[in-house]
């Protein structure tokens, strides 16, 4: 094996040869053999091998393998030097291989090394994005779990930092094609990351692009399968997929498939749902998602049938007034509990879908059932007025910092909920029932539009990305508001639904979290 002096001498031969450097193959071979030496020899080899690599294509494999040996050396300084120089080997047909190698090196636990790998990947991305992606996706599809996980996270965090000239339309199409292969067999956490990757692509900001994403989510959600409310993984998958789909819906990208599935499969089983996360009010979570989607539902095949299911579920949360005894006192032990959070969601969803069949209450229900509904509405409206007065009185005169206390924030949300229900009930009391009023769901940010400023449509048929909508409220732990009478729903605030990281199922060999173990060891 060569000494330090011999390495310097052969380096000098190659450096002085200028245009005739390729004629000194023996000198380059001496430098390659430097990887078998001690620490000093290896450190020099790590710098010299890449410098003259392009002049010796016939020794390309030997040179790359020599550098890889240095990338796996026990001495951290040698490893870092070798990794730093890897992009110099990314020429022509060698680039996908170098990308593949760098992707595998993401598994390092050394933070400085990890940053070097990230920077090296980004530098070869700018040389050939498609070739680099080929290496990354190769490891995502076939690599070991830790490499797959870090490669996906690399894509989800770094792609958005690349300039437009790197992420061309052709490159984005390649990302979509390869992502579809990965999505055939993913965990829940991986699915969420890939939706983040894909929804950030410029080419998928158009109406047709968003429609493609909705179809991808629908496929993952298994909307063709019968829903199993007792299986927490089935419930988990539907919730996570629906949450990914909701931001994609608009007046041009319809939620019809999801709304239909919720009405037909989920609502009838609402009370038997198994929560996938301890402490999560699963029924309220489902109803919130349905409400958010209902605004963007298109033409529904079984509209009347599904509207009836929604109506029947609404009745369950809108009690009849308690019977009065002869002395005018309440004959029962206590008045029915009014669950305003549930009713806001159900009433809003019914109001949205009811617009598509405005004569449902008058022509599709018999007179007795309509009368029963009006009595329930009236009783609920009376309870509403009491709570609205109490809440307004509690918040009267409070501004700024005073409204930021936890107690008052909960009361503000409570007031939004009760006001929303009040507006919707007034609509339904019209003769015939009206569906013209618009409200903003209590957990959604209010859209403010300046006078004279037109609303911009978030969907566009051009390739330019849409303007970002205001960020939604943070999903803090649910708040509890107990009014004096104790009849208020205890689920007012935003739900706290953490990512579980797995949709454990049996999709393919790996499933949503049941990904099989793959071989370990060097795959270069």
Image (cartoon, rainbow, N blue to C red):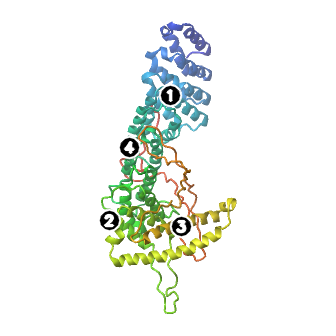
Select label 2 or label 3 by which is in front: 3
* Residue 419's disc number: 3
Discs 4, 3 touching: Cβ within 8 Å: no
Separation of residues labelled 1 and 4 (CA atoms): 28 Å
Quarter of the picture containing the N terminus is top right
Separation of residues labelled 1 and 2 (CA atoms): 55 Å
Find residue 296 and report its horizontal and vertical position in percent: 41, 55
Select label 4 or label 3 by which is in front: 3
Q: Residue furthest front?
A: 452
Separation of residues labelled 4 and 3 (CA atoms): 37 Å
Q: Earlier in the sequence, mark 1 or mark 2?
A: 1
Quarter of the picture containing the C terminus is top left
Q: Earlier in the sequence, mark 4 or mark 3?
A: 4
Quadrant in the rendering for residue 436: bottom left
Quadrant in the rendering for residue 262: bottom left
In this image, 266 relative to 340: left or right?
A: left
Find residue 302 and report its horizontal and vertical position in percent: 30, 61
* Residue 126's disc number: 1
Select label 3 or label 1 by which is in front: 3
Which residue lies under the disc numbered 4? 208
Which residue lies under the disc numbered 2? 304
Answer above or below: position of 1 versus 258.
above
Q: Secondary structure at mark 2?
A: helix
């Amino acid at each position: 094996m060569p000494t330090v002096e011999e390495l310097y001498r052969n380096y000098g031969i190659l450096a002085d040869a200028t245009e005739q450097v390729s004629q000194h193959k023996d000198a380059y071979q001496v430098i390659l053999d430097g990887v078998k030496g001690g620490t000093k020899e290896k450190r020099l080899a790590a710098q010299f091998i890449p410098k003259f690599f392009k002049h010796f294509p016939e020794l390309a494999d030997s040179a790359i393998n020599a550098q890889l040996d240095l990338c796996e050396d026990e001495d951290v300084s040698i490893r870092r030097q070798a990794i730093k120089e890897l992009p110099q080997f990314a020429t022509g047909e060698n680039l996908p291989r170098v990308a593949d190698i760098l992707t595998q090196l993401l598994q390092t636990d050394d933070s400085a090394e990890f940053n070097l790998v990230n920077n090296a990947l980004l530098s070869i991305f700018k040389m050939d994005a498609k070739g680099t992606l080929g290496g990354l996706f190769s490891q995502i599809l076939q690599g070991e779990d830790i490499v797959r996980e870090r490669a996906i996270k690399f894509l989800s965090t770094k792609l958005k930092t690349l300039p437009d000239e790197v992420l061309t339309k052709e490159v984005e199409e390649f990302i979509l094609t390869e992502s579809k292969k990965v999505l055939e067999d993913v965990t829940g956490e991986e699915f969420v990351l890939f939706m983040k990757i894909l929804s950030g692509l410029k080419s998928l900001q158009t109406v047709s692009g968003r429609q493609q994403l909705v179809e991808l989510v629908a496929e993952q959600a298994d909307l063709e399968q019968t829903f199993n409310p007792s299986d927490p993984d089935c419930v988990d998958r539907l919730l996570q997929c629906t949450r990914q789909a909701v931001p994609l819906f608009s007046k041009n990208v319809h939620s019809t498939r999801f709304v239909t599935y919720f009405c037909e499969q989920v609502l009838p089983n609402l009370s038997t749902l198994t929560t996938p996360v301890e402490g999560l009010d699963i029924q309220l979570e489902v109803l919130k998602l349905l409400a958010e989607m209902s605004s963007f539902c298109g033409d529904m095949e079984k509209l009347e049938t599904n509207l009836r299911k929604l109506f029947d579920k609404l009745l369950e949360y809108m009690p009849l007034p308690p019977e009065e005894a002869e002395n005018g006192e309440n004959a029962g032990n206590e008045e029915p509990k009014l669950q305003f959070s549930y009713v806001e969601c159900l009433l809003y969803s019914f109001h949205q879908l009811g617009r598509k069949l405005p004569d449902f209450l008058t022509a599709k229900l018999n007179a007795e059932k309509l009368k029963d509904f009006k009595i329930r509405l009236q009783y609920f409206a009376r309870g509403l007025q009491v709570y609205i007065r109490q809440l307004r009185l509690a918040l009267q005169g409070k501004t700024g910092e005073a409204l930021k206390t936890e107690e008052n924030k909960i009361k503000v949300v409570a007031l939004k909920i009760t006001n929303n229900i009040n507006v919707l009930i007034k609509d339904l009391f019209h003769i015939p029932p009206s569906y013209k009023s618009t409200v903003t769901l209590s957990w959604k940010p209010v859209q403010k539009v300046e006078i004279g400023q037109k609303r911009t449509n978030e969907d566009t048929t051009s390739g330019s990305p849409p303007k970002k909508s205001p960020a939604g409220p943070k999903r803090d732990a649910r708040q509890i508001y107990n009014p004096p009478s104790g009849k208020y729903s205890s689920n007012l605030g935003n739900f706290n639904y953490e990512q579980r990281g797995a949709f454990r199922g049996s999709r393919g060999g790996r499933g949503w979290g049941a990904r099989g173990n793959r071989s370990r060891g060097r795959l270069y």
